[in-house]
């Protein structure tokens, strides 16, 4: 009998990024925005995901303007990435201050839903961004979801407890000639 824990592979390789701006970052004109993102690791299975998550600082330990991102392999958390061009994002904000702590677990649940294809249109989701200070979860999608309200509906169905969390949904399409959000 083996003591080895079974591993459950994902269909895609995923990259975990942490955005950690330097002190005074907003005031430095010559610093590129992308320089504040650091790729932490890649993972393509459930066990690797849990190991990566376990080694991250908790959201409470993160500095202001910091966030976590997971994106499919080869896609950067930048609107200029060719696989993000023409797409957009669905942004979920928790409005009820008494339940903001739930957003941490919600982000983990949503990552697992996307990576495990438990949300309709998950193949069109390029990545997720989590800003625990606001608190906001963003689903970045490719240009093939039209209209984006289909993804909003799919996400809200996956989060049947969203009413109790006081969620607010917003979606925005991004065009390369626009300024980023």
Image (tube, grey):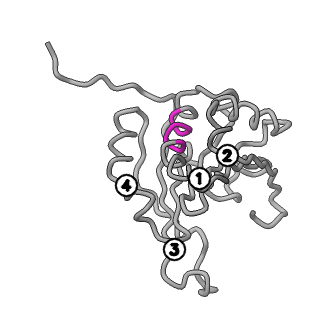
Apparent side of residue 42 relative to residue 118 in the rendered image (left or right): left
Depicted 29 relative to depicted 66: above or below: below
Please report the bounds of the magenta region as a residue range: 106-112
- Look at mark 4 in the image and give the residue it sits on: 56
Depicted 117 relative to depicted 110: above or below: above
Give the label, 2 or 1, closer to the camera. 2
Q: Quadrant of the N terminus?
A: top left
Find the distance from the CA under tag 1 to the CA under tag 3: 15 Å
Q: Are marks 4 and 1 in contact (CB under 8 Å)?
A: no
Q: Are marks 2 and 1 in contact (CB under 8 Å)?
A: no
- Look at mark 3 in the image and give the residue it sits on: 21
- Of callouts 2 and 1, which one flags the residue occurring earlier in the amino acid sequence? 1
- Of callouts 2 and 4, which one flags the residue occurring earlier in the amino acid sequence? 4
Instruction: Give yes or no for residue 108 being in the magenta stretch.
Output: yes
Find the distance from the CA under tag 2 to the CA under tag 4: 27 Å
Find the distance from the CA under tag 4 to the CA under tag 3: 16 Å
Please rate how many residues cluster around mark 2, counting C-alpha atoms within 10 Å: few if below 14, some from 14 to 19, many from 20: some
Q: Quadrant of residue 146?
A: top right
Please rate how many residues cluster around mark 4, counting C-alpha atoms within 10 Å: few if below 14, some from 14 to 19, many from 20: few
Residue displayed at 16% across by 22% down: 3
- Look at mark 2 in the image and give the residue it sits on: 166
- Look at mark 1 in the image and give the residue it sits on: 129
């Amino acid at each position: 009998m083996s003591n080895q824990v079974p591993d459950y592979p994902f269909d895609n390789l995923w990259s975990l990024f942490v955005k950690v701006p330097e002190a005074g970052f907003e005031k430095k004109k010559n610093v590129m925005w992308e320089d504040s993102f650091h790729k932490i690791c890649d993972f393509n299975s459930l066990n690797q995901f849990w190991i990566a998550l376990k080694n991250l600082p908790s959201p409470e330990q993160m500095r202001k303007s910091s966030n976590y991102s997971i994106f499919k392999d080869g896609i950067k958390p930048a609107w200029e990435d060719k696989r993000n061009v023409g797409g957009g994002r669905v942004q979920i904000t928790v409005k009820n201050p008494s339940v903001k702590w739930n957003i941490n677990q919600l982000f983990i649940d949503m990552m697992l839903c996307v990576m495990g294809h438990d949300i309709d249109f998950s193949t069109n989701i390029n990545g997720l961004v989590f800003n625990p200070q606001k608190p906001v979860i963003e689903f970045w999608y490719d240009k093939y979801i039209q209209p984006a309200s289909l993804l909003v509906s799919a996400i809200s169905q996956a989060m049947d407890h969203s009413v109790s969390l006081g969620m607010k949904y917003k979606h925005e399409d991004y065009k390369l000639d626009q300024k980023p959000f």
